[in-house]
Image (cartoon, rainbow, N blue to C red):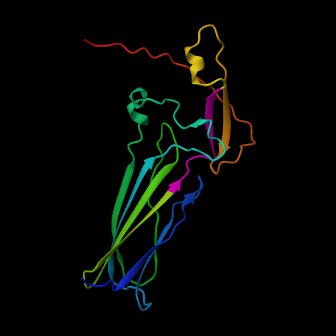
């Protein structure tokens, strides 16, 4: 066992606003305070679609209106994106990493980002750090609920009533006017013998 000769600090914020660039500072210092001047840095950023559940809106469903993944078109399934790069730390200053992580182009929603960095010094000692964050795609998100519960769909001769709300990415009510259209689709499941 060899004790760590240096430490790695990964900055950044836990939540990024929609128009805010994703900037993640990385710093490596020896335990006595001097910055590493020659080191290899390998970073990886993995992002996957994340549904939003703002506090105070628990009775509303945000994100895709389809609850069964088999009904989603393949282009909106949210497979995620990953970026990896190797850079050299040479001048002892902190790195500022700005990974390009595009949103789902068909159905934009927040990204859950896992950022991992590995720093290897001249003695081949490697220290890794992981940081998780959320990058929002939109200023606001729409939430939906059936006024009388989802059981309304099973009733006959009853009007379908629902409510839609707009909540800011931080959960606050969205006060601007928003145009909304809704589509109800009937799905029939058939057994195959």
Q: Is residue 100 visible?
A: no
At which x and y percent is residue 109?
52, 43
- Taking the image as shown, residue 29 lies to the left or right of residue 127, namely right
Is the stretch drawn in magenta largely helix, strand or loop?
strand
Q: How many marks?
A: 0
**Front-lying residue, 111 or 55:** 55
Q: Residue at x 46, y 78 (%)?
A: 94
Q: Residue at x 60, y 18 (%)?
A: 152
- Looking at this view, name the residue that lies furthest to the top: 157
Q: Is residue 94 above or below residue 104?
A: below
Q: Quadrant of residue 6?
A: bottom left
Residue 141 lies in magenta, yes or no?
yes
Task: Please report the bounds of the magenta region as a residue range.
Answer: 134-146
At which x and y percent is residue 105?
48, 40
Residue 102 lies in magenta, yes or no?
no
At which x and y percent is residue 55?
63, 47
Q: Is residue 91 above or below residue 147?
A: below
At which x and y percent is residue 143?
62, 36
Q: Is residue 150 above or below residue 86?
A: above
Q: Quadrant of residue 188?
A: top left
- Taking the image as shown, residue 72 lies to the left or right of residue 144, namely left
Q: Tell me the quarter of the image containing the C terminus.
A: top left
Q: Residue at x 52, y 42 (%)?
A: 108
**Front-lying residue, 102 or 188:** 188
């Amino acid at each position: 066992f060899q004790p760590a000769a240096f430490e790695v600090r990964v900055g950044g914020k836990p939540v990024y606003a929609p128009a805010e660039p994703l900037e993640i500072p990385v710093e490596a210092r020896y335990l006595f305070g001097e910055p590493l001047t020659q080191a290899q840095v390998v970073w990886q950023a993995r992002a996957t679609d994340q549904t939003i559940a703002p506090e105070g809106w628990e009775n509303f469903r945000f994100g895709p209106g389809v609850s069964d993944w088999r009904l989603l078109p393949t282009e909106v399934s949210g497979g995620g994106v990953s970026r990896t790069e190797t850079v050299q730390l040479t001048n002892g200053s902190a790195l500022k990493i700005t990974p390009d992580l595009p949103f789902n182009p068909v159905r934009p929603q927040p990204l859950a980002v896992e950022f991992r960095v590995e720093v290897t010094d001249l003695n081949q000692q490697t220290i890794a750090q992981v940081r998780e964050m959320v990058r929002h795609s939109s200023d606001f998100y729409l939430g939906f609920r059936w006024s009388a519960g989802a059981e309304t769909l099973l009733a006959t001769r009853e009007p379908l009533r629902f409510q839609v709300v707009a909540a800011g990415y931080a959960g606050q009510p969205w006060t601007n006017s928003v145009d909304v259209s809704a589509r109800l689709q009937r799905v029939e499941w058939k057994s195959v013998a």
